[in-house]
Image: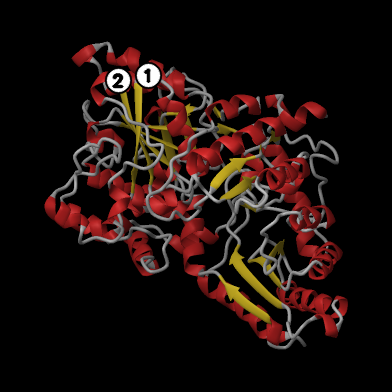
Amino acid sequence: MADLMLSHDILMNIEQPARYIGNEINMVVKDPNKVDIRFAMCFPDVYEIGMSHMGIQIIYEMLNRRDDVYCERVYSPWTDLDKIMRDKNIPLFALESQDPVRDFDFLGITIQYEMCYTNILQVLDLAGISIYAKERKLNEPFVIGGGPCAYNPEPLADFFDLFYIGEGETSYYKLLDAYKEWKKSGESRKRIDFLKAAAQIEGIYVPCLYDVKADKDGRILDFKPNCPEAPETVKKQLVHDMGDDLTFYPKKPLVSLVQATQDRVSIEIQRGCIRGCRFCQAGMIYRPVRQKDVNELKELAVKMLDATGHEEISLLSLSSSDYESLEELVTFLIEKYQGSGVNLSLPSLRIDAFSLDVMSKVQDVKKSSLTFAPEAGSQRLRNVINKGLTKEDILRGSTEAFKGGWTKVKLYFMLGLPTETDEDRRGIADLSEDVAMAYYDSIPRENRIGKKVQVTASSSFFIPKPFTPLQWAGMHTYDEYMSMAKTVNDHMKEVTNHKSIKYNWHDAKTSVIEGFLARGGRDISKVIVAAYKKGCIYDAWTEYFDYDKWIEAARECGIDLVEYTIRERDIDEHLPWDFIDIGVKKSFLLKEYENALNEKVTKNCKEGCSGCGAGTFAAGICLKH
């Protein structure tokens, strides 16, 4: 085990010292002096969150397959250690070797959600790496970003040397080979030379090789490459064969020393989604749907459980019910681990007869909580967002679930959707009431054994995301969001079964900032820096989020944050992310936006091809049409 960077005294005076010592089960150990490339992979949030992310474990496995690369991990220090590191000038370090991150060749940062942007600056700052990419010296790491938020990299463009657009299993090896070639040029080499070489690899975006002009409101006036090495468009990278993906899927995943948020074996059963919900970014950027072979998944599940000692396995997908071999896989796992205490988790199921039948086969399923995501309170508004779920579907599923022994139902909604009215909002309470009534109508009094149904309705606030049909839509102010939630809450108190219904709503101030960051351009990078300097980190955590500091930071930078956020984008406007080619055509997204405003439903990919453009990848479900 490497000598620890933190002293015994420090470790004994911070929360969860095990976050910082490494040495987890299945950790990769190499001699740093016997590799050509050192790569620090970072999740810019606390250890427990980062250790739950399977994407990092896949990249960790993939890079460490190479004898010439040592991939290590780093997470955001919690606030207690953050202060100590600043006071004592302790540099941010990797868990495996305990070496300073600044001494590595690459710092890779996965960007999973917008509210971690100030944590990215925290990581750079504590590591002693120049926050602005243009100020980095030859001996500083190249900072590369990836993940879903990299599909609009512009708010962070000033801080990153490169972005990887797409699925990480495809082009990383090419990038590392290009780095080795550049490194051979010795002390005379320049950072820009490697960046120009990297820009010629498909899926790699190098921000400094593009010039951007925008007006005072953030509208882009011009965006173009400033050298011949940079392509006009950057095409996302995609795994065509899911068997190839399983090549890098960790058979021996890391096991956290402290309880992680998702403390279980996680297996991705398919990538992408057929449904086409118009608010959902993942459903667009991960197209086309590609399923994994059920026999390979069976083998993988056994190996991962044997290697970790976990007592739960989770089957991951954007819509698990759409995986064609789900019943076969579930049946295998139940029979394989019957009586062994291994639980099976099935997130992202559509609550229909098939899914309920599958869930009923799970040995230790807790029949106390069932989740629906109607998203909108009225059928009209569900048609607007192309949810593909009717009131009849919801009540039918609820009734079958109640007959099967479930007594608790969670309903998830959004407020502030395009064309939404007060009638739609009151529909949230009405639908919650209908679900409660379905219990009392379907379960005879003598069979309730003193139990009553518990319906929990929760609403978040709609945030238009890049590469969705609703990317042009405007948002609302904090006060408007609160008024919407009040409308729902007031009507909840009026329905007959209000004592059986609980209503919660998300923090609207967080939604405003998230929306600001989601559709921002390079002009807002200065706001992120200003907010960080005011003390903003861990913005995704309610106890640390400070809305007023963000508003102040934007004002000091000459930006009206609220106006920037609520502004509806013009359909002919050049959007900050338009240079990225995800396969799905902008013309398709625009047509879907028009369909939304006309309340027109588009069928899902299994029912028929809608010509979105993802067929250009010639993979997955697109090969069937």
The answer to whether 152 appears left or right of 623 in the picture is left
User: Which element type, helix, strand or loop, lies under badge 2?
Assistant: loop
Circles 2 and 1: CB atoms closer than 8 Å: yes
> Which image quadrant for residue 541?
bottom left
User: Which element type, helix, strand or loop, lies under badge 1?
Assistant: loop
Res 407 seen here: yes
Across and down, in percent, residue 227 comes to 41, 20
Disc number for residue 35: 2
Res 216 seen here: no
Q: How many other residues sit within 10 Å of disc 2, few (<14), some (14-19) or many (≥20)?
A: few
Q: Nearer the viewer, residue 176 or 56?
A: 56
- Inspect the image, locate mark 1, and give the three-letter code of the amino acid beneath it: Asp
Q: Earlier in the sequence, mark 2 or mark 1?
A: 2
Q: Residue at x 42, y 48 (%)?
A: 50
The answer to whether 214 appears left or right of 180 in the picture is right
Q: Nearer the viewer, residue 24 or 34?
A: 24
In the picture of the structure, the residue carrying the numbered disc 1 is 67
The answer to whether 56 appears left or right of 39 in the picture is right
- Inspect the image, locate mark 2, and give the three-letter code of the amino acid beneath it: Val
Residue placed furthest toward the left: 88
Q: Is residue 493 above or below residue 572?
A: below
